[in-house]
Amino acid sequence: MGSLDSALSVLDEMEKVGLEPDLITFNTLPNAFYQNENRMSEAVELIDEMKTSGIKPDVFTLNSLMKGFCNAGNLEEAKRWYSEIARNELPPVRATYMTLIPFLVEKGDFELCKEVCSRRWLIEPALLQ
């Protein structure tokens, strides 16, 4: 609802009353972090907390981090989270490429663009144009 701090306090309250946050609970937060781009380090801490709690991030969680770093203009971190998708043996989704490819082109990183395109994943023709 637009209040990241309120969402984080609900997460704290859940833990205080003995409720375990799950993947869905955690997946609602990364989007809010990237909308507040100066809080991306907190999003990374959240992912670390997920892993510590035994919750494996899914492709949507990692996409949110990748998108946040793309929006913040941080090429290295965006590529890091794209790599995490493969490292966790998760299949990329269309949103992965809709976010990543224009950012790579903007930053002039054509090598990774070529690699992504050579794998023949489902990429919109308009995106390639």
Image: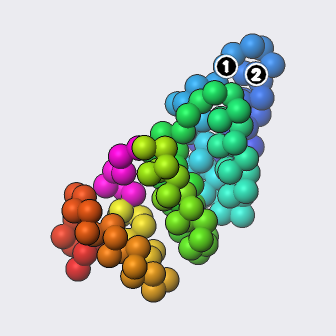
Looking at the rendered structure, the kind of residue marked 1 is Glu
User: Residue most toward the top?
Assistant: 18
Circle 2: element type: helix
What segment is highlighted magenta in the picture? 90-96
Q: Is residue 49 above or below residue 115?
A: above
Where is the N terminus found, in terms of image quarters?
top right
Snapshot colouring:
rainbow
Residue 68 spot, x, y in % from top left: 57, 61
Q: Is label 1 in a helix, a strand or a loop?
A: loop
The quadrant of the rendering that contains the C terminus is bottom left
Residue at coordinates 73% horizontally, 51% vertically from top-left?
A: 42
Q: Horizontally, is 119 left or right of 80 in the view?
A: left
Residue 126 shown left or right of residue 98 in the figure = left
What residue does disc 1 label? Answer: 20
Task: In this rendered view, identify the residue nearer to me: 76 or 40.
Answer: 76
Residue 62, position in %: x, y?
52, 49
Identify which residue is drawn at 34% across, 70% down: 115
On residue 15, the disc is 2
Contact (Cβ within 8 Å) of mark 1 with mark 2? yes
Is 100 a magenta residue? no
> Outermost residue, bottom direction?
108
Residue depicted at 39% across the width and 82% down the height: 110
Q: Is residue 109 left or right of residue 13?
A: left
